[in-house]
Amino acid sequence: MALSIDTISDVHTYGLDVKSREIYLHGYVANCDEDPGVDYRMASIFIKNIRILDLVNNDPIFIHMHSVGGEWNDGMAMYDAISLTKSYVTIIAYGQAESMSSIILQSADNRIMMPNAYFMSHFGTSEFSGNYLDIQNVAKFDAVCNETMLDIYTSACLSGKYFKEHYNLLDEDKVRNFLKRKLKNGDWYLNAHESVYYGLSDCVLATRKYPSIDSLK
């Protein structure tokens, strides 16, 4: 398929290909050596892009995500935007689905991992200085965010093969308690196939079900 100069420019400038209904989700160039990850710039551009595609029509949308994670509020803005999209959404995770990007992944109708991508989840961290009462309030809010994260992961894992194999009577409390134990030990890493096994993604690309990106469409 021949691409026009305008299409190539839109992809590199805005991360959007309207014709193929594809969004490229990644950190943006900042004045630092490290990837800024999920932040207000990524969220602002992404929300505009997905709304544009959803307003054009309700054909499937494909999101190519390469993100190290990042800010909770910006990530949840993107999570909500995807969840409320009328179009069927597929996210393809490149490199990693970790921290906030692992949560964003759960908002898609179809969650695809690249063969060499990994999945990582953990309890959130915060850096805050201020008076005693403000710090207490921040800690309470962080606890609420962690519970929301557990809600999202638990809902996803209920369909995971691991839990169906290990629990005769499967319910949300058992899955949630399992996840709490895992995350209390620190960062929880899974390879692409393990993430499917636990229900945190749907399939790995380059396997029999999905041999290529074109097979997703």
Image (cartoon, rainbow, N blue to C red):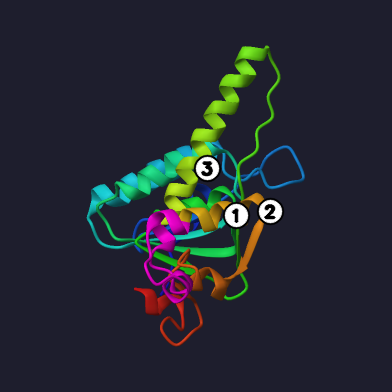
How packed is label 1: few (under 14 Cα within 10 Å), some, or many (20 or more)?
Answer: few
How packed is label 3: few (under 14 Cα within 10 Å), some, or many (20 or more)?
Answer: some
Identify the residue position indicated by label 1 in the image.
181
Q: CA distance from mark 3 to mark 2?
A: 30 Å
Label 3 SS:
helix
The residue nearer to you, when weighing 189 against 1, is 189
The residue nearer to you, when weighing 202 against 135, is 135
Q: Position of residue 63 (x, y in %)?
A: 44, 59
Q: CA distance from mark 1 to mark 2?
A: 7 Å
Q: Quadrant of residue 142?
A: top right
Magenta stretch: dominant SS? Answer: helix
Query: The residue under label 3 is which amino acid type?
Result: Met
Query: The residue under label 2 is which amino acid type?
Result: Asn
The residue nearer to you, when weighing 58 against 193, is 193
Q: Position of residue 112 (x, y in %)?
A: 46, 68
Q: Is residue 56 above or below residue 114?
A: above
Identify the residue position indicated by label 2 in the image.
185
Magenta stretch in the rendered image: 155-175
Does any portion of residue 74 appear in the rendered image?
Answer: yes
Q: Position of residue 87 (x, y in %)?
A: 27, 56
